[in-house]
Image (spheres, helix red, strand yellow):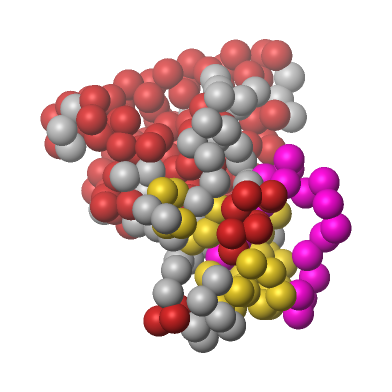
Amino acid sequence: MSNNAIGTDIYVAIPERGQQVLPLLAGDLVDVRVLARERFALFAERPGGRLYRLHGEPSGSRDYPEWPTLMFRALFVGESVLRVVEELPDWSVFGPRGKAVEDLIDQYLFLDDTGKSSYHRVEQVGRALLRDYAKEEAGGDSFLESIFDGTVYGGRFEMACRALYYLANSSCAAGPLALAAAIILREGLGEEAYEHLVQPYRLASIPFLEQVE
């Protein structure tokens, strides 16, 4: 961080394991280094966006790819000091279309075994389309890898992709990963590729938000 950042917003995501201390409230002053070290926080330039670096490394730990569930908007008031402005919905970690991703996850988790089995069949088709798209249009396996390490499209969706990587290693691993990826990356994919990737879910009448306020 530098003095050039003073007066600018930053978005802070704190995973569950970093919430076991006193809560942050609007108006609180906090040091980004303390948040990173003691609360395992991630810092981004916008919700779901490119991560700020502390000493040249991504904030947070690559060894613990969690879904950060506590989100704040804060303001730089010093070189490394933030003032908490407001708490944001937890889905904002996935970016401006995060509400659609959260609803998709909730929908999947509440399915019974029969519903999950049907969903898995559609998801397999969706993942196959994503693999084919990567192979034919976007550089193959390296494109898929770049989604989960956050470097896809130059890191524009890095925070969201880190959260998506957590989902890939959670109880949602067999769930809506390909559809969630398409929703998160829609701006990078372009409408034609996005429409192609979500088609199996539409044909299976799986509901998901198209427009997010």
Q: Looking at the image, which residue is at 70% across and 29% down?
A: 109
Q: Position of residue 91 (x, y in %)?
A: 63, 53
**Residue 34 location, quadrant:** bottom right
Relative to 136, is 49 on the left or the right?
Answer: right
Quadrant of the frame with the C terminus: bottom right
Q: Position of residue 163 (x, y in %)?
A: 53, 42
Is residue 1 located in the magenta-colored stretch of the structure? Answer: no
Q: Does the rendering let one see residue 52?
A: yes
Does the magenta stretch mainly form a helix, a strand or a loop?
loop
Q: How many marks?
A: 0
**Residue 71 location, quadrant:** bottom right
Is residue 18 located in the magenta-colored stretch of the structure? Answer: yes
**Residue situated furthest bottom in the rendering:** 7
Relative to 186, is 80 on the left or the right?
Answer: right
Range shown magenta: 11-28
Q: Looking at the image, which residue is at 71% across and 75% down?
A: 29
Relative to 142, is 136 on the left or the right?
Answer: left
Q: Position of residue 131 (x, y in %)?
A: 28, 25
Q: Looking at the image, which residue is at 53% across and 59% down?
A: 43
Look at the picture and state if 132 lies above or below 19: above
